Image: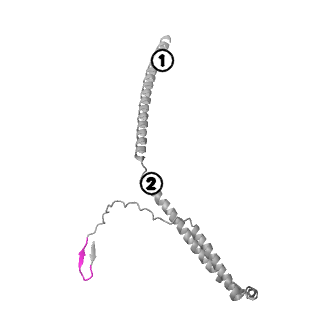
Amino acid sequence: MVVPILGGEDKHHHSAPPLAVLRPDPPPVEPRPAIPSDGRTTRLGGIALSVLWIALCAYYANTSIGWGNLVFMQPQEIGGIAGAAFMPLAFLWLVVAYLDRGQELRSVSVEIRQQLSRLTYPAEGAEARVSAIADSLRAQARELVQASNDASTKGEAIRDMLAKQVEAMTTVVGRVVGGLHQLA
């Protein structure tokens, strides 16, 4: 392969695909000890912040606007106040849902890693079970070969017996035909 080099020179460069470097598998990584949580803490925190926010909004509406004045406000003003009160709650619960989902994904990830570890490193006694199964299969194969040989031997004996009977019947038919020719 010719690789042009800036400056006018051409250098011949032979490259082969790199060989794979065999490295031992890294030891299994133990999962980080996580704070045991089923998402309850996150949801309780979300509920507490929601109640606190609604209480602050109610306090603001009571002290700044007055509950009686809300009736006299125009619809767009009421909509703005409602949006200002409930948009932060929507964002809060979006974050709570994201954190809850992340915790669930981490939990499932740990379970998958553990299952993969169990599949990768066979359990104790697996070699003995595999050896016992292999021995059983070998014994069954020997029995099957023996049964096939016995069936083959019996088949040959039946064939020989039938051949003798056909020969005897041919002889009898030949005598009968010969006797009929003499009578005729």
- Depth check: give the residue in front, 3 or 169: 3
Answer above or below: position of 113 versus 98.
Answer: above
Q: Identify the disc placed on residue 119.
A: 2
Q: Identify the residue shown where x is 49% and y is 63%.
A: 109
Cα distance, mark 2 to mark 1?
A: 74 Å
Q: Secondary structure at mark 2?
A: helix
Locate residue 23, reporting x and y percent.
33, 61
Instruction: Count residues near mark 1 (Cα–Cα under 10 Å), then give few for <14, some for 14-19, many for 20+.
Output: few
Locate residue 73, reporting x and y percent.
73, 88
Residue 171 vs residue 92: left or right? left
Q: Nearer the viewer, mark 2 or mark 1?
A: 2
- Depth check: give the residue in front, 72 or 3: 72
Please name the predominant secondary structure of the magenta segment in the image.
Answer: loop
The image quarter in which residue 139 lies: top left
- Which colour style is shown? one colour
Q: Identify the residue shown where x is 46% and y is 58%.
A: 114
- The residue beneath circle 1 is 173
* Residue that protrudes farthest toward the top in the picture: 183
Q: Which residues are magenta?
A: 5-13
| Amino acid beneath label 2 | Leu
Locate residue 161, reporting x and y percent.
44, 22
Instruction: Count residues near mark 2 (Cα–Cα under 10 Å), then give few for <14, some for 14-19, many for 20+.
Output: few
Answer above or below: position of 112 versus 97.
Answer: above
Locate residue 167, reporting x and y percent.
44, 20
Q: Is residue 82 visible?
A: no
Q: Secondary structure at mark 1?
A: helix
Residue 151 vs residue 87: left or right? left
| Amino acid beneath label 1 | Val
The mark that comes first in sequence, 2 or 1, is 2
